[in-house]
Amino acid sequence: MNLVRRVANLEARPLLRIVPPEPVPVESPADVLAVMAEQINAVRVDAITDATEKARILGMLSSVALRAIEAKDLAARLEALERVLKLRRTEQEDGKKRKGWRGY
């Protein structure tokens, strides 16, 4: 391909304006899930990327998203368990105070 034809092909292509995304805080599994969803959707609508490359990227992003979902579920279960233990501890302390008040 000669230089003139290459330049003509480049000029015929539409210009892509890449807008950098706003920074997203990633501090919890829910934040990771939000970023993963955004990136999965960006890959799906990308017209330039080859189909096999899209499949590879989507598979990798999906596996990361699944791990984030598991971490989110685990964090929620741990938080619920901590609340129950705190309530039990409070109930036991209240029970000891009542017993002490009655003189038992």
Image (tube, rainbow, N blue to C red):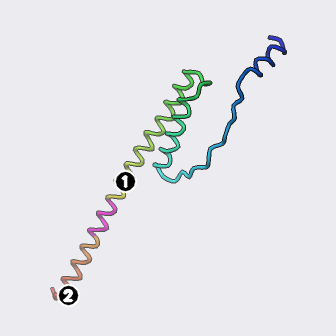
Residue 41 x/y as whole percent: 52, 34
Q: Label 2 amino acid?
A: Trp
In the depicted structure, whether residue 79 falls above or below residue 33: below
Residues tagged 2 and 1 counted as in contact (Cβ below 8 A): no
Majority secondary structure of magenta residues: helix
User: Looking at the figure, which quarter contains the N terminus?
Assistant: top right
Residue under pointer 2: 101
Displayed quadrant of residue 20: top right
User: Disc 2 versus disc 1: distance between alpha carbons?
Assistant: 37 Å
Identify the disc placed on residue 76: 1
Mark earlier in primary sequence (2, 1):
1
* Residue drawn at (53%, 39%) of the image: 38
Task: Verify whether residue 26 appears in magenta.
Answer: no
Labels 2, 1: front one: 1
User: Looking at the figure, which quarter contains the C terminus?
Assistant: bottom left
Q: Label 1 amino acid?
A: Ala
Q: Is residue 61 left or right of residue 74?
A: right
* Residue drawn at (66%, 40%) of the image: 19
Q: Which residues are magenta?
A: 81-88
Residue 50 x/y as whole percent: 59, 21
Q: Is residue 16 left or right of residue 96?
A: right
Disc 1 secondary structure class: helix
Disc 2 secondary structure class: helix
Displayed quadrant of residue 48: top right
Query: How would you rate the neighbour count of disc 1 (Cα within 10 Å): few for under 14, some for 14-19, many for 20 or more?
Result: few
In the displayed image of the protein, which residue is found farthest to the right?
3
Q: Is residue 27 left or right of residue 8?
A: left
* Residue drawn at (36%, 58%) of the image: 79
Residue 57 x/y as whole percent: 54, 30
* Residue drawn at (54%, 21%) of the image: 52
Displayed quadrant of residue 70: top left
In the depicted structure, whether residue 53 falls above or below residue 68: above
